[in-house]
Amino acid sequence: MKILVLGGGGREHALVWKLRESPRVEKIWCAPGNGGIAAEAECVAIDAGDVGAIVAFAEGTHPDLTIVGPELPLVNGLTDAFRQRSWAVVGPSKQAAQLEGSKIFSKEFLARHHIPTAKMYGTYDSSADVYKALNSVAWPVVIKADGLCAGKGVFLAPDVAAAKDFVERVMEKNELGPGGRRVLLEETLEGEELSFIILTDGNRYAPLVPTRDHKRVFDGNQGPNTGGMGAYSTDELLPDDLRETIRLTIVEPTLSGLAADGIHYQGFLYIGLMLTKSGPKVLEFNCRLGDPEAQAILARLDFDLAEVLSDVAAAGHLDPSKLRWKAGAGTCVVLASGGYPGKFESGKRIEGLTSLGQITGVKVLHAGTKLLGDAVVTNSGRVLGVTAAAATLEDALAAAYEAASRIHFEGMHYRRDIGAHPTRQKAAGD
Ligand SMILES: Nc1ncnc2c1ncn2[C@@H]1O[C@H](COP(=O)(O)OP(=O)(O)O)[C@@H](O)[C@H]1O
Ligand SMILES: [Mg+2]
Protein backbone atom coordinates (compact mmCIF):
# COMPACT_ATOMS: atom_id res chain seq x y z
CA MET A 1 0.00 0.00 0.00
CA LYS A 2 1.01 3.56 -0.69
CA ILE A 3 -0.41 5.98 1.86
CA LEU A 4 -0.72 9.76 1.94
CA VAL A 5 -0.98 11.38 5.39
CA LEU A 6 -2.14 15.01 5.57
CA GLY A 7 -0.81 17.30 8.27
CA GLY A 8 2.50 18.08 9.89
CA GLY A 9 2.22 17.83 13.66
CA GLY A 10 2.77 15.28 16.41
CA ARG A 11 -0.50 13.50 15.64
CA GLU A 12 0.59 12.94 12.05
CA HIS A 13 4.03 11.75 13.15
CA ALA A 14 2.27 9.22 15.41
CA LEU A 15 0.14 8.03 12.47
CA VAL A 16 3.21 7.65 10.25
CA TRP A 17 5.07 5.82 13.04
CA LYS A 18 2.31 3.20 13.40
CA LEU A 19 1.51 2.92 9.67
CA ARG A 20 5.13 2.08 9.03
CA GLU A 21 4.87 -0.91 11.36
CA SER A 22 2.39 -2.51 8.98
CA PRO A 23 3.98 -5.07 6.66
CA ARG A 24 1.57 -4.08 3.90
CA VAL A 25 2.78 -0.46 3.72
CA GLU A 26 5.46 0.16 1.11
CA LYS A 27 5.40 3.95 0.83
CA ILE A 28 4.19 6.93 2.87
CA TRP A 29 3.97 10.55 1.78
CA CYS A 30 3.19 13.25 4.32
CA ALA A 31 2.01 16.74 3.34
CA PRO A 32 3.59 18.87 4.66
CA GLY A 33 5.19 16.69 7.38
CA ASN A 34 7.98 18.02 9.62
CA GLY A 35 11.60 17.48 10.61
CA GLY A 36 10.92 14.17 12.38
CA ILE A 37 8.43 12.76 9.90
CA ALA A 38 11.06 13.35 7.19
CA ALA A 39 13.05 10.39 8.56
CA GLU A 40 10.08 8.03 8.17
CA ALA A 41 8.09 9.27 5.17
CA GLU A 42 8.55 11.40 2.08
CA CYS A 43 7.53 14.92 3.05
CA VAL A 44 5.80 16.92 0.33
CA ALA A 45 5.73 20.71 0.63
CA ILE A 46 1.98 21.16 0.22
CA ASP A 47 -0.33 22.82 2.73
CA ALA A 48 -2.73 20.16 4.04
CA GLY A 49 -5.65 22.60 3.78
CA ASP A 50 -5.07 23.31 0.07
CA VAL A 51 -7.61 20.93 -1.48
CA GLY A 52 -6.70 21.70 -5.10
CA ALA A 53 -3.00 21.09 -4.54
CA ILE A 54 -3.58 17.85 -2.61
CA VAL A 55 -5.91 16.52 -5.32
CA ALA A 56 -3.31 17.38 -7.98
CA PHE A 57 -0.63 15.57 -5.98
CA ALA A 58 -2.80 12.47 -5.56
CA GLU A 59 -3.65 12.53 -9.26
CA GLY A 60 0.02 12.15 -10.02
CA THR A 61 0.98 9.65 -7.32
CA HIS A 62 -2.14 7.46 -6.84
CA PRO A 63 -2.05 6.74 -3.10
CA ASP A 64 -4.08 3.66 -2.17
CA LEU A 65 -5.25 5.42 0.97
CA THR A 66 -5.25 9.01 2.27
CA ILE A 67 -5.57 9.81 5.96
CA VAL A 68 -6.52 13.31 7.06
CA GLY A 69 -4.92 14.45 10.34
CA PRO A 70 -6.13 18.01 11.03
CA GLU A 71 -9.57 19.66 10.76
CA LEU A 72 -8.90 22.27 8.08
CA PRO A 73 -8.81 19.92 5.05
CA LEU A 74 -12.08 18.36 6.28
CA VAL A 75 -13.83 21.69 6.66
CA ASN A 76 -12.44 22.71 3.24
CA GLY A 77 -14.03 19.66 1.58
CA LEU A 78 -10.99 17.52 0.89
CA THR A 79 -12.70 14.19 1.55
CA ASP A 80 -15.61 15.15 -0.73
CA ALA A 81 -13.15 15.88 -3.54
CA PHE A 82 -11.51 12.48 -2.99
CA ARG A 83 -14.77 10.53 -2.80
CA GLN A 84 -16.05 12.16 -6.00
CA ARG A 85 -13.04 10.53 -7.67
CA SER A 86 -13.57 7.22 -5.81
CA TRP A 87 -10.24 7.59 -3.98
CA ALA A 88 -9.99 5.91 -0.58
CA VAL A 89 -9.81 8.47 2.22
CA VAL A 90 -10.31 8.44 6.00
CA GLY A 91 -12.19 11.48 7.30
CA PRO A 92 -15.74 12.86 7.38
CA SER A 93 -17.33 14.96 4.64
CA LYS A 94 -17.42 18.74 4.70
CA GLN A 95 -21.05 18.57 5.83
CA ALA A 96 -20.25 16.17 8.68
CA ALA A 97 -17.19 18.21 9.68
CA GLN A 98 -19.60 21.02 10.66
CA LEU A 99 -19.82 19.16 13.97
CA GLU A 100 -16.39 20.66 14.63
CA GLY A 101 -16.40 23.60 12.21
CA SER A 102 -19.47 25.23 13.77
CA LYS A 103 -20.12 25.04 17.51
CA ILE A 104 -23.65 26.35 16.90
CA PHE A 105 -24.31 23.54 14.40
CA SER A 106 -23.08 21.02 16.95
CA LYS A 107 -25.14 22.48 19.82
CA GLU A 108 -28.25 22.36 17.64
CA PHE A 109 -27.43 18.78 16.70
CA LEU A 110 -27.05 17.82 20.38
CA ALA A 111 -30.33 19.49 21.33
CA ARG A 112 -32.22 17.91 18.41
CA HIS A 113 -31.14 14.43 19.44
CA HIS A 114 -31.44 14.91 23.23
CA ILE A 115 -27.76 14.23 23.88
CA PRO A 116 -26.54 15.53 27.28
CA THR A 117 -24.60 18.80 26.98
CA ALA A 118 -24.33 22.18 28.72
CA LYS A 119 -27.54 24.19 28.52
CA MET A 120 -27.28 26.85 25.84
CA TYR A 121 -28.62 30.35 26.55
CA GLY A 122 -28.60 31.44 22.91
CA THR A 123 -26.64 32.24 19.77
CA TYR A 124 -25.74 35.78 18.73
CA ASP A 125 -24.66 37.65 15.59
CA SER A 126 -23.81 40.96 17.25
CA SER A 127 -21.97 42.02 20.38
CA ALA A 128 -24.93 44.21 21.42
CA ASP A 129 -27.14 41.13 21.54
CA VAL A 130 -24.60 39.26 23.67
CA TYR A 131 -24.32 42.17 26.12
CA LYS A 132 -28.09 42.15 26.51
CA ALA A 133 -28.16 38.39 27.06
CA LEU A 134 -25.47 38.65 29.74
CA ASN A 135 -28.12 40.20 32.02
CA SER A 136 -29.83 36.87 32.45
CA VAL A 137 -27.14 34.21 32.71
CA ALA A 138 -25.61 32.42 35.68
CA TRP A 139 -21.92 33.11 36.42
CA PRO A 140 -19.37 32.04 35.41
CA VAL A 141 -20.72 31.74 31.86
CA VAL A 142 -19.04 30.03 28.89
CA ILE A 143 -18.68 32.03 25.67
CA LYS A 144 -17.88 30.11 22.50
CA ALA A 145 -16.98 31.51 19.10
CA ASP A 146 -18.82 29.54 16.46
CA GLY A 147 -16.07 28.74 13.96
CA LEU A 148 -12.56 27.27 13.94
CA CYS A 149 -10.35 29.37 16.22
CA ALA A 150 -7.31 27.14 16.82
CA GLY A 151 -8.24 26.54 20.46
CA LYS A 152 -8.68 30.24 21.30
CA GLY A 153 -12.42 30.55 20.78
CA VAL A 154 -13.74 29.46 24.19
CA PHE A 155 -13.75 31.66 27.27
CA LEU A 156 -15.04 30.92 30.76
CA ALA A 157 -16.07 34.40 31.86
CA PRO A 158 -16.11 35.07 35.62
CA ASP A 159 -18.07 38.33 35.37
CA VAL A 160 -19.69 40.85 33.02
CA ALA A 161 -16.55 42.93 32.52
CA ALA A 162 -14.46 39.94 31.46
CA ALA A 163 -17.25 38.63 29.25
CA LYS A 164 -17.62 41.97 27.48
CA ASP A 165 -13.88 42.24 26.97
CA PHE A 166 -13.76 38.82 25.27
CA VAL A 167 -16.82 39.50 23.13
CA GLU A 168 -15.40 42.85 22.05
CA ARG A 169 -12.12 41.25 20.98
CA VAL A 170 -13.84 38.43 19.13
CA MET A 171 -16.86 40.14 17.57
CA GLU A 172 -15.80 43.76 17.15
CA LYS A 173 -12.03 43.60 16.70
CA ASN A 174 -12.22 40.22 14.91
CA GLU A 175 -9.11 39.01 16.72
CA LEU A 176 -9.94 35.37 15.95
CA GLY A 177 -10.93 35.98 12.33
CA PRO A 178 -14.20 34.86 10.72
CA GLY A 179 -14.63 32.06 13.32
CA GLY A 180 -15.70 34.76 15.79
CA ARG A 181 -18.53 36.32 13.78
CA ARG A 182 -21.15 34.44 15.77
CA VAL A 183 -20.95 33.29 19.37
CA LEU A 184 -23.00 31.20 21.75
CA LEU A 185 -23.43 31.39 25.51
CA GLU A 186 -23.79 28.26 27.60
CA GLU A 187 -23.82 27.18 31.22
CA THR A 188 -20.58 26.22 32.95
CA LEU A 189 -20.24 22.53 33.73
CA GLU A 190 -18.14 21.16 36.55
CA GLY A 191 -16.22 17.91 36.60
CA GLU A 192 -13.27 16.16 35.07
CA GLU A 193 -12.78 16.04 31.33
CA LEU A 194 -12.33 12.91 29.26
CA SER A 195 -11.54 12.45 25.59
CA PHE A 196 -13.53 9.64 24.06
CA ILE A 197 -12.66 8.94 20.45
CA ILE A 198 -14.32 6.48 18.13
CA LEU A 199 -13.47 5.22 14.66
CA THR A 200 -16.45 4.57 12.41
CA ASP A 201 -17.05 3.53 8.81
CA GLY A 202 -20.51 5.13 8.92
CA ASN A 203 -22.09 1.87 9.92
CA ARG A 204 -20.10 0.16 12.65
CA TYR A 205 -17.81 1.83 15.16
CA ALA A 206 -15.02 0.99 17.57
CA PRO A 207 -13.99 3.11 20.56
CA LEU A 208 -10.30 3.89 20.98
CA VAL A 209 -8.76 3.72 24.45
CA PRO A 210 -9.75 6.70 26.64
CA THR A 211 -7.43 9.68 27.15
CA ARG A 212 -7.14 12.84 29.14
CA ASP A 213 -5.16 15.85 27.98
CA HIS A 214 -3.66 18.78 29.83
CA LYS A 215 -4.55 22.07 28.17
CA ARG A 216 -3.09 24.68 30.52
CA VAL A 217 0.51 25.65 30.05
CA PHE A 218 1.75 25.28 33.64
CA ASP A 219 1.74 22.56 36.31
CA GLY A 220 -1.37 22.29 38.45
CA ASN A 221 -3.50 23.49 35.50
CA GLN A 222 -2.31 27.07 35.81
CA GLY A 223 -1.78 29.66 33.10
CA PRO A 224 -3.38 30.10 29.69
CA ASN A 225 -4.75 27.36 27.45
CA THR A 226 -2.53 25.76 24.83
CA GLY A 227 -3.10 23.27 22.04
CA GLY A 228 -2.27 20.62 24.65
CA MET A 229 0.82 20.15 26.84
CA GLY A 230 0.48 16.40 27.23
CA ALA A 231 -1.91 13.50 27.49
CA TYR A 232 -2.19 10.05 28.98
CA SER A 233 -4.25 6.96 28.35
CA THR A 234 -5.06 4.18 30.81
CA ASP A 235 -8.13 2.00 31.00
CA GLU A 236 -8.63 3.24 34.57
CA LEU A 237 -9.90 6.53 33.13
CA LEU A 238 -13.01 4.65 32.07
CA PRO A 239 -14.65 2.23 34.51
CA ASP A 240 -17.10 -0.21 32.88
CA ASP A 241 -20.25 1.52 34.15
CA LEU A 242 -19.09 4.89 32.82
CA ARG A 243 -18.18 3.30 29.48
CA GLU A 244 -21.68 1.88 29.28
CA THR A 245 -23.31 5.21 30.17
CA ILE A 246 -21.26 6.98 27.50
CA ARG A 247 -22.20 4.34 24.95
CA LEU A 248 -25.91 4.53 25.72
CA THR A 249 -26.41 8.24 26.33
CA ILE A 250 -23.83 9.75 24.01
CA VAL A 251 -22.14 7.58 21.38
CA GLU A 252 -25.14 5.69 20.05
CA PRO A 253 -27.53 8.69 20.06
CA THR A 254 -24.83 10.66 18.22
CA LEU A 255 -24.42 8.03 15.51
CA SER A 256 -28.14 7.48 15.12
CA GLY A 257 -28.70 11.25 15.13
CA LEU A 258 -26.21 11.64 12.29
CA ALA A 259 -27.98 8.91 10.35
CA ALA A 260 -31.40 10.49 11.04
CA ASP A 261 -30.07 13.82 9.75
CA GLY A 262 -28.82 12.11 6.58
CA ILE A 263 -25.17 12.78 7.44
CA HIS A 264 -22.82 9.95 6.56
CA TYR A 265 -19.95 10.12 9.03
CA GLN A 266 -16.77 8.16 8.36
CA GLY A 267 -13.46 8.56 10.18
CA PHE A 268 -12.43 9.48 13.70
CA LEU A 269 -14.95 11.26 15.89
CA TYR A 270 -13.57 12.88 19.03
CA ILE A 271 -16.10 13.45 21.76
CA GLY A 272 -14.92 15.88 24.43
CA LEU A 273 -16.77 15.06 27.65
CA MET A 274 -17.27 16.65 31.04
CA LEU A 275 -17.93 14.01 33.68
CA THR A 276 -20.45 15.91 35.79
CA LYS A 277 -22.30 14.81 38.92
CA SER A 278 -25.36 14.24 36.76
CA GLY A 279 -23.49 12.14 34.21
CA PRO A 280 -21.20 12.64 31.22
CA LYS A 281 -22.03 15.64 29.01
CA VAL A 282 -20.66 16.62 25.61
CA LEU A 283 -18.41 19.70 25.58
CA GLU A 284 -17.60 19.49 21.90
CA PHE A 285 -17.01 17.28 18.90
CA ASN A 286 -13.83 17.18 16.85
CA CYS A 287 -13.82 15.40 13.51
CA ARG A 288 -10.38 13.91 13.90
CA LEU A 289 -7.94 12.51 16.40
CA GLY A 290 -6.89 14.93 19.15
CA ASP A 291 -3.31 16.12 19.42
CA PRO A 292 -1.59 15.13 21.78
CA GLU A 293 -4.25 12.49 22.62
CA ALA A 294 -3.43 10.60 19.41
CA GLN A 295 0.17 10.15 20.52
CA ALA A 296 -0.82 8.63 23.89
CA ILE A 297 -3.44 6.41 22.25
CA LEU A 298 -1.36 5.20 19.33
CA ALA A 299 1.49 4.32 21.71
CA ARG A 300 -0.86 1.58 22.99
CA LEU A 301 -1.88 0.33 19.55
CA ASP A 302 -1.59 -3.40 18.98
CA PHE A 303 -3.10 -3.91 15.53
CA ASP A 304 -2.38 -3.21 11.90
CA LEU A 305 -3.40 0.44 11.51
CA ALA A 306 -3.07 0.44 7.72
CA GLU A 307 -5.33 -2.58 7.46
CA VAL A 308 -8.02 -1.18 9.76
CA LEU A 309 -8.00 2.26 8.15
CA SER A 310 -8.27 0.79 4.67
CA ASP A 311 -11.19 -1.33 5.90
CA VAL A 312 -12.83 1.92 7.01
CA ALA A 313 -12.06 3.85 3.83
CA ALA A 314 -11.99 1.56 0.89
CA ALA A 315 -14.42 -1.15 1.76
CA GLY A 316 -16.47 0.44 4.54
CA HIS A 317 -16.07 -2.79 6.48
CA LEU A 318 -14.74 -1.87 9.88
CA ASP A 319 -14.33 -4.93 12.08
CA PRO A 320 -14.28 -3.53 15.64
CA SER A 321 -12.70 -6.73 16.99
CA LYS A 322 -9.51 -5.93 15.06
CA LEU A 323 -8.76 -2.94 17.31
CA ARG A 324 -6.58 -4.36 20.05
CA TRP A 325 -4.68 -2.35 22.64
CA LYS A 326 -1.75 -2.92 24.93
CA ALA A 327 -2.74 -3.11 28.57
CA GLY A 328 -1.12 -0.48 30.78
CA ALA A 329 -0.64 3.09 29.74
CA GLY A 330 0.51 5.50 27.07
CA THR A 331 1.61 9.06 27.63
CA CYS A 332 2.87 12.06 25.71
CA VAL A 333 4.78 14.97 27.27
CA VAL A 334 4.95 18.04 25.05
CA LEU A 335 8.19 20.06 24.96
CA ALA A 336 7.29 23.63 24.01
CA SER A 337 9.12 26.75 22.84
CA GLY A 338 9.95 29.49 25.35
CA GLY A 339 7.00 31.89 25.60
CA TYR A 340 4.43 29.48 24.11
CA PRO A 341 1.39 29.82 24.02
CA GLY A 342 2.29 33.51 23.74
CA LYS A 343 5.05 34.86 21.50
CA PHE A 344 8.00 32.55 20.92
CA GLU A 345 11.05 32.30 18.68
CA SER A 346 11.74 29.46 16.25
CA GLY A 347 14.94 28.11 14.73
CA LYS A 348 16.48 26.90 18.02
CA ARG A 349 18.78 23.93 17.61
CA ILE A 350 17.50 20.79 19.37
CA GLU A 351 20.15 18.73 21.21
CA GLY A 352 20.01 15.25 22.67
CA LEU A 353 17.69 13.53 20.20
CA THR A 354 20.22 10.87 19.29
CA SER A 355 20.93 9.75 22.88
CA LEU A 356 17.52 8.26 23.58
CA GLY A 357 17.88 4.80 22.04
CA GLN A 358 18.36 3.06 25.39
CA ILE A 359 15.06 4.09 26.98
CA THR A 360 12.57 1.28 26.38
CA GLY A 361 9.13 2.16 25.12
CA VAL A 362 9.95 5.78 24.27
CA LYS A 363 9.34 7.41 20.92
CA VAL A 364 10.03 11.10 20.37
CA LEU A 365 7.36 12.39 18.02
CA HIS A 366 8.02 15.68 16.29
CA ALA A 367 5.32 18.35 16.35
CA GLY A 368 7.01 21.55 15.20
CA THR A 369 10.52 20.90 13.91
CA LYS A 370 12.39 21.22 10.67
CA LEU A 371 15.71 20.11 9.29
CA LEU A 372 18.39 22.73 8.77
CA GLY A 373 21.40 21.05 7.20
CA ASP A 374 22.06 18.15 9.55
CA ALA A 375 20.50 19.90 12.56
CA VAL A 376 16.92 19.64 13.78
CA VAL A 377 15.55 23.05 14.79
CA THR A 378 12.34 24.25 16.43
CA ASN A 379 9.65 25.48 14.08
CA SER A 380 6.50 25.99 16.16
CA GLY A 381 5.13 26.46 19.68
CA ARG A 382 4.76 22.79 20.42
CA VAL A 383 8.04 21.25 19.34
CA LEU A 384 8.25 17.60 20.43
CA GLY A 385 5.92 15.05 22.01
CA VAL A 386 7.92 12.61 24.10
CA THR A 387 5.72 9.53 23.94
CA ALA A 388 5.97 6.34 25.98
CA ALA A 389 4.05 3.15 26.60
CA ALA A 390 4.55 0.83 29.58
CA ALA A 391 2.78 -1.66 31.82
CA THR A 392 1.77 1.07 34.27
CA LEU A 393 1.16 4.81 34.02
CA GLU A 394 3.98 5.44 36.52
CA ASP A 395 6.46 3.53 34.31
CA ALA A 396 5.30 5.26 31.13
CA LEU A 397 5.66 8.67 32.79
CA ALA A 398 9.08 7.79 34.23
CA ALA A 399 10.32 6.76 30.77
CA ALA A 400 8.91 9.85 29.06
CA TYR A 401 10.36 12.21 31.67
CA GLU A 402 13.75 10.47 31.56
CA ALA A 403 13.82 11.04 27.80
CA ALA A 404 12.61 14.64 28.15
CA SER A 405 15.45 15.37 30.59
CA ARG A 406 18.00 14.42 27.92
CA ILE A 407 16.59 16.79 25.30
CA HIS A 408 17.40 20.46 25.22
CA PHE A 409 16.77 23.61 23.24
CA GLU A 410 16.93 27.25 24.27
CA GLY A 411 13.75 28.29 26.09
CA MET A 412 12.34 24.73 26.25
CA HIS A 413 9.63 24.17 28.83
CA TYR A 414 7.25 21.36 29.70
CA ARG A 415 4.83 20.33 32.39
CA ARG A 416 6.11 18.02 35.12
CA ASP A 417 2.69 16.76 36.13
CA ILE A 418 1.33 15.02 33.04
CA GLY A 419 -0.75 12.06 34.15
CA ALA A 420 -1.50 13.50 37.58
CA HIS A 421 -5.10 12.95 38.50
CA PRO A 422 -6.82 16.35 38.90
CA THR A 423 -8.61 15.51 42.15
CA ARG A 424 -5.51 13.91 43.65
CA GLN A 425 -3.63 17.01 42.57
CA LYS A 426 -6.12 19.30 44.27
CA ALA A 427 -6.02 17.25 47.42
CA ALA A 428 -2.21 17.43 47.46
CA GLY A 429 -2.39 21.22 47.24
CA ASP A 430 -4.88 21.59 50.08
N1 LIG B 1 -19.77 24.36 29.23
C1 LIG B 1 -18.54 24.31 29.70
N2 LIG B 1 -18.33 24.28 31.04
C2 LIG B 1 -17.08 24.26 31.55
N3 LIG B 1 -15.97 24.26 30.81
C3 LIG B 1 -16.10 24.28 29.47
C4 LIG B 1 -17.39 24.31 28.84
N4 LIG B 1 -17.20 24.31 27.50
C5 LIG B 1 -15.87 24.30 27.31
N5 LIG B 1 -15.19 24.28 28.48
C6 LIG B 1 -13.74 24.27 28.67
O1 LIG B 1 -13.10 24.90 27.58
C7 LIG B 1 -12.26 23.99 26.87
C8 LIG B 1 -12.36 24.27 25.38
O2 LIG B 1 -13.69 24.14 24.96
P1 LIG B 1 -14.09 23.27 23.71
O3 LIG B 1 -15.55 23.28 23.59
O4 LIG B 1 -13.40 21.94 23.83
O5 LIG B 1 -13.52 24.11 22.48
P2 LIG B 1 -12.14 24.14 21.68
O6 LIG B 1 -11.41 22.85 21.96
O7 LIG B 1 -12.59 24.25 20.27
O8 LIG B 1 -11.42 25.35 22.15
C9 LIG B 1 -12.78 22.61 27.26
O9 LIG B 1 -11.78 21.63 27.14
C10 LIG B 1 -13.21 22.86 28.71
O10 LIG B 1 -12.07 22.84 29.57
MG1 LIG C 1 -11.61 21.10 22.93
Image (cartoon, rainbow, N blue to C red):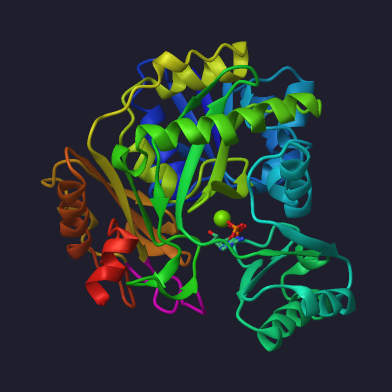
Q: Is residue 114 magenta?
A: no
- Is residue 25 visible in the rendered structure shown here? yes
Query: Where's the C terminus, which quadrant?
Result: bottom left
Residue under the point 24% across and 64% down: 351
Left or right: residue 31 versus residue 169 is left
Residue 324 horizontal/vertical position (percent):
34, 22
Q: Nearer the viewer, residue 75 or 184?
A: 184
Residue 163 horizontal/vertical position (percent):
70, 80
**Vertical comparison of 238 with 212: above or below:** above
Q: Is residue 339 magenta?
A: yes
Residue under the point 25% across and 41% down: 329
Residue 259 horizontal/vertical position (percent):
74, 24
What range is drawn magenta here? 336-349
Given the current orientation, which residue lies at the most extreme left position? 358
Left or right: residue 243 versus residue 415 is right
Left or right: residue 168 versus residue 306 is right
Residue under the point 46% across and 58% down: 191
Left or right: residue 62 versus residue 191 is right
Quarter of the view holding residue 99: top right
Q: Which of 372 and 244 is in front in this view?
A: 244
Residue under the point 57% across and 22% down: 65
- Is residue 67 visible in the rendered structure shown here? no
**Vertical comparison of 99 with 205: above or below:** below
Ligand 1: quadrant of the figure: bottom right
Given the current orientation, which residue lies at the most extreme bottom position? 161
Q: Which of 369 and 156 is in front in this view?
A: 156
Quarter of the view holding residue 288: top right
Residue 397 horizontal/vertical position (percent):
21, 53
**Vertical comparison of 185 with 94: above or below:** below
